[in-house]
Image (cartoon, rainbow, N blue to C red):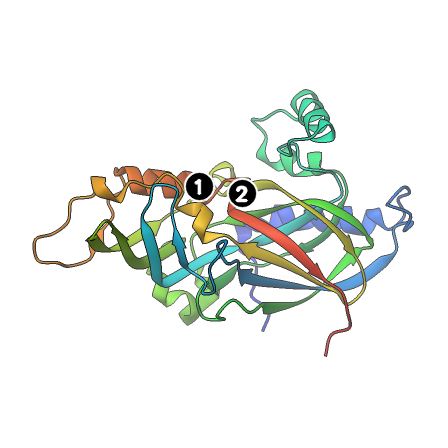
Amino acid sequence: MTTPLRPTRRAFTTMLGAALLGGGAACGLSGTGGRAIVFRMGLRTGLAPGESQPGHFTTDTGWRVELTSARMVLGPIYLFENPSPLQSRPTGRWWRRVGEVLVPTAYAHESFFSGGQVLGEWDREVVFDLLAEGGATRELGRSPGIAGRVRSFSLLLQPPSQALGAEAAPLEGHSVLLEGMASREGHGLAFRVALDFPPPVETQRVEFVPTEVELEDDGLFVVELQPHRWFEGTLFERLEVPTSGAAVAVPSESQVHRALLLNVRRHTAFSAAWEPGTAP
């Protein structure tokens, strides 16, 4: 069933929808001529290097983390023709300079369009259980688009809306809710951390994630969540562990919480893959 959009997102959907419709007549799209297509959108949890189970990884600070529960709200998702200004290559640096000149950073609406033509979008919010699929892809559904090379994408993180109903109940009103175990050198602790991304949209947006895929009919564009990247720099040793042995409710003022809040919005927190083929 299609989830209704929240009123705060309608302006974005209208603008992006117009860009998609208008783009059909545009020229210079990787040799495609702006051909209208229908593709599929999906989500999955990426595996950390050397791991076989999603949500299991060792951080760069030496802590072994095993997530036991992980849910979040994400979307809408936008696919762009222009390369990410965050890519470490000459074209990326050039687009960053162009964006700084043409796009005032104070205007959140406008910065979406510095990605160039919108080639596709998933215009709804989704509750995603990072561990439920065991690393397999959850297909969200079909979406209209324009054939061409997608070089970057953006997405929003936000609190669950009433439109999500019971599906969002496990999140308890939070944008992200993670539970798990962290251990290092014989010391371990259970933790529970909630992240919130309330408006304005500047605090919710994950911008210009680099990718290189050819968007075509019936293929599957997969957004991969990279939870092992979210925990980079986390110092669990700074958390105060209850003497009762209960799980640590990670406080918002802690270093661990601050690191997660920043990392989840970094362009390295997500990646994308393309799976060609016809839907079953």
Q: What is the count of numbered marks?
A: 2
- Left or right: 248 as drawn, with respect to 1: left
Outermost residue to the left: 243
The quarter of the image holding the N terminus is bottom right
Q: Residue at x 69, y 20 (%)?
A: 101
Using a 10 Å C-alpha cutoff, classify the residue at mark 2 as few (fewer than 14 neighbours), some (14 to 19) or many (20 or more).
some
**Label number found at residue 166:** none
- Left or right: 152 as drawn, with respect to 269: right
Residue 249: % across, % down: 22, 52
- Left or right: 27 as drawn, with respect to 207: right
**Label number found at residue 268:** 2
Residue 204: % across, % down: 49, 43
- Which structural element holds mark 2? helix
**Type of residue at label 2?**
Thr
Q: Which residue is drawn at 61% across and 67% down?
A: 140
Residue wearing tag 1:
263
Using the image as rendered, state which of residue 20 and residue 249 is in the foreground. Answer: 249
The relative height of residue 204 versus residue 176 in the rendered view (above or below) is: above
Using the image as rendered, state which of residue 198 and residue 32 is in the foreground. Answer: 32
The relative height of residue 280 versus residue 154 in the rendered view (above or below) is: below
* Residue 173 in view here: no
Using a 10 Å C-alpha cutoff, classify the residue at mark 1 as few (fewer than 14 neighbours), some (14 to 19) or many (20 or more).
some
| Picture quadrant of residue 43 | bottom right
Using the image as rendered, state which of residue 230 and residue 153 is in the foreground. Answer: 230
Residue 228: % across, % down: 44, 50
CB within 8 Å, label 2 to label 1: yes
